[in-house]
Every structure is written in C-alpha cells, then in structure tokens.
Image (cartoon, rainbow, N blue to C red):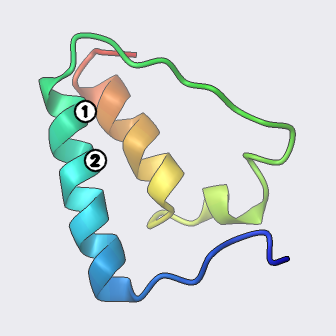
Amino acid sequence: MPKYLSIPMEAMKSISKVMLRHLQESDAVLLVVAEDTFQDDIYRDDDGIRREIRAAITHDIL
C-alpha cells in the first residue's frame, strides 16, 4: 500500500484553497504531527503542510 495518495495538481490547488480559507476563519488550530511529518517535503516552500502551518502562524491562530 502506498504511503501517500497521488492527487492531481489542480485538485491539490483546490483543496489547498479550501484548507487555507478554513484556517483563516478558525479561532484555533491544533497541530498534530507524526514521527515522519517533517520528512523531505516539508523543506519545499510549496509543501501543503508547510503552507498550512505558515497560514496558522501568519493569522496568529496557532
């Protein structure tokens, strides 16, 4: 079983917009990480988890 699902880029952009909108509307964010959450992808500026964490910090909700 693959560790990650392959999602088309256009779908990811749509999902990302929705996630960021919900983050901006939230009063709080609970960040739950696993042992491998911060693997290689987190160092890419366009990584989804990185964007969500950045949005939460930027909007002072983390």
Q: Seen in the image, is 46 located left or right of residue 17?
A: right
Residue type highlighted by circle 1: Leu
Question: Which disc is residue 19 wearing?
Answer: 2
Under circle 2, the secondary element is helix
- Cα distance in 3D space between marks 2 and 1: 6 Å
Question: Which disc is residue 23 wearing?
Answer: 1
The residue that appears at 39% across and 43% down in the rendered structure is 52
24 versus 49 height, above or below: above
> x and y percent of residue 17 in the render?
20, 58
> x and y percent of residue 42 in the render?
63, 56
50 versus 34 height, above or below: below
Q: Seen in the image, is 10 located left or right of residue 2?
A: left
Residue type highlighted by circle 2: Met
> x and y percent of residue 46 in the render?
44, 67
Task: Count residues near mark 1 (Cα–Cα under 10 Å), then give few for <14, some for 14-19, many for 20+.
Answer: some
Task: Count residues near mark 2 (Cα–Cα under 10 Å), then give few for <14, some for 14-19, many for 20+.
Answer: some
> x and y percent of residue 3 in the render?
79, 69
| Mark 2 vs 1: CB contact within 8 A | yes
Task: Name the foreground residue: 11 vs 59.
Answer: 11
- Quadrant hosting residue 32: top right
14 versus 59 height, above or below: below
The residue that appears at 78% across and 36% down in the rendered structure is 34
